[in-house]
Amino acid sequence: MFNIALYQPDIPQNTGAIIRLCSCFDVTLEIIEPCGFHFDDRRLKRVVMDYLDKSKIITYKSYNDFLNRKNDTRIILMTTKAKKNYNNFKFKKKDTILFGRESSGVPKIVHNNSYQRLKIPLKKNTRSLNIGMAVAITLSEALRQNIN
């Protein structure tokens, strides 16, 4: 099934909420380091509760390490800089849906290495959603499209 990937996350509470989300839907979470926090951070633990032990999490020491292990996988980058909407895209079960760092998104090389760049359409003059909400919205659509 799908993987959700986080590029160098820097807010532990968001990552904790995404860990819970992925655990509840049996989705693997991939985390590309460095993170802006440690996994023993109390803020992460407060949100993740007991889901950490029930989760499938893969960590990568770098973006290159992540890329080297994604040979036959489409990497779908969710970004506010995309032109195409997520709900006009056909997700496949083996896709990895990548989300950028909360404070700064992703560098150009990540954009260039993505199979597709998608956005969640927002009301004009708004900047972005919380990353946890963006993951939930996107994962919900990907799952909806692929339920047998």
Image: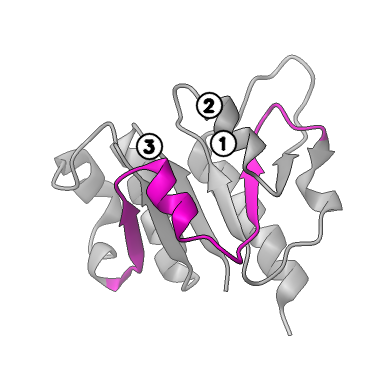
Q: Image point 48% across, 22% down: which residue?
A: 104
Q: Amino acid at mark 1?
A: Val
- Helix, strand or loop for disc 3: loop
Residue bearing mark 2: 107
Measuring from the top left, give residue 111's x and y in whole percent: 63, 34
Measuring from the top left, give residue 45's x and y in whole percent: 20, 50
Q: Earlier in the sequence, mark 2 or mark 3?
A: 3
Q: Is residue 110 left or right of residue 114?
A: left
* Closer to us: 77 or 144: 77
Q: Amino acid at mark 3?
A: Pro
Q: Decide: few, some or many residues near mark 1? Use Cα within 10 Å; few <14, some 14-19, many ≥20.
A: some
Q: Image point 53% across, 26% down: which residue?
A: 107
Q: Which quarter of the picture shows residue 103?
A: top left
Q: Amino acid at mark 2?
A: Pro
Q: Is residue 37 left or right of residue 1?
A: left
Q: Looking at the image, is mark 2 or mark 3 nearer the viewer? A: 2
Q: Quadrant of the N terminus?
A: bottom right
Most extreme residue toward the bottom is 148
| C-alpha span from label 2 to label 3 | 13 Å
Above or below: residue 111 compared with residue 21: above
Residue bearing mark 1: 110
Q: Is residue 17 left or right of residue 109?
A: left
Question: Does the stretch in magenta take in 75?
Answer: yes
Measuring from the top left, give residue 142's x and y in whole percent: 69, 62
Q: Decide: few, some or many residues near mark 2? Use Cα within 10 Å; few <14, some 14-19, many ≥20.
A: few
Q: Image point 38% across, 37% down: which residue?
A: 8
Measuring from the top left, give residue 138's x and y in whole percent: 65, 52
Q: Which quarter of the picture shows residue 2?
A: bottom right
Contact (Cβ within 8 Å) of mark 1 with mark 2: yes
Residue bearing mark 3: 9
Contact (Cβ within 8 Å) of mark 1 with mark 3: no
Residue segment shown in magenta:
54-83
